[in-house]
Image: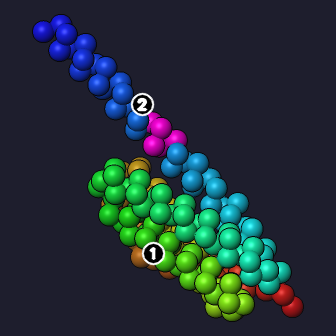
């Protein structure tokens, strides 16, 4: 009986440790996104297709890890869908940047930024136990704010 208890405690500690590591990885991925997004925007503004494509590919890889994290964790279909959409959009940005289609790449970046904002809103409310999803009005407001900031930064 005592051996069973000890083994159960050891197993629980290992599981908690694995979950903490995954959570730590997840936080690292989320913290890397603003840095990569800023570099992507800078490289698109400079019309540096190769560097912009590399930034977009880095974002795509990160969102693949995020999607896998939420699939493994379960119970957050919204997060899985947001991550999958972000991957596809980042792939489009990379393709357009490599082809020199900077206007389309910039439009896709706006979509990617709105997607990120929608996910942050939903996950923050979900984590706080306030709502299971973010109100569509909050997502629309986030999209409008991103679009407004992006147009403010356009070269004159």
Q: Which residue is mark 2?
A: 17
**Dot 2 lies on which element?**
helix
**Dot 1 lies on which element?**
helix
Nearer to the camera, 11 or 82: 11
Check the image and tell me how it is coloured: rainbow
Task: Determine the residue positioned at 36% across, 27% down.
Answer: 14
> In the rendered image, which quarter is residue 36 located in?
bottom right
Residue 35 vertical placement versus 25 (above, below) = below
Question: What distance separates the C-alpha of mark 1 from that of mark 2?
Answer: 30 Å
Task: Determine the residue positioned at 47% across, 38% down.
Answer: 21
Residue 9 vertical placement versus 68 (above, below) = above
Residue 152 vertical placement versus 62 (above, below) = below
> In the rendered image, which quarter is residue 146 located in?
bottom right
The disc at residue 85 is: 1
Q: Which residues are magenta?
A: 20-24
With 94 as the anchor, is 73 left or right in this view? left
Res. 104 in view: yes
């Amino acid at each position: 009986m005592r051996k069973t208890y000890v083994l159960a405690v050891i197993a629980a500690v290992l599981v908690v440790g694995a979950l903490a590591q995954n959570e730590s990885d997840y936080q690292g991925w989320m913290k890397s996104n603003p840095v990569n997004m800023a570099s992507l925007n800078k490289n698109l503004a400079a019309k540096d297709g190769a560097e912009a494509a590399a930034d977009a590919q880095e974002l795509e890889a990160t969102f693949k890890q995020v999607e896998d994290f939420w699939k493994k964790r379960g119970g957050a279909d919204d997060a899985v869908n947001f991550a999958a959409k972000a991957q596809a959009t980042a792939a489009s940005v990379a393709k357009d940047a490599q082809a020199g289609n900077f206007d389309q790449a910039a439009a896709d970046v706006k979509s990617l930024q709105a997607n990120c904002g929608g996910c942050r809103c939903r996950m923050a409310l979900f984590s706080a136990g306030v709502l299971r999803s973010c109100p569509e009005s909050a997502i629309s407001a986030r999209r409008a704010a991103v679009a407004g900031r992006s147009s403010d930064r356009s070269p004159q």
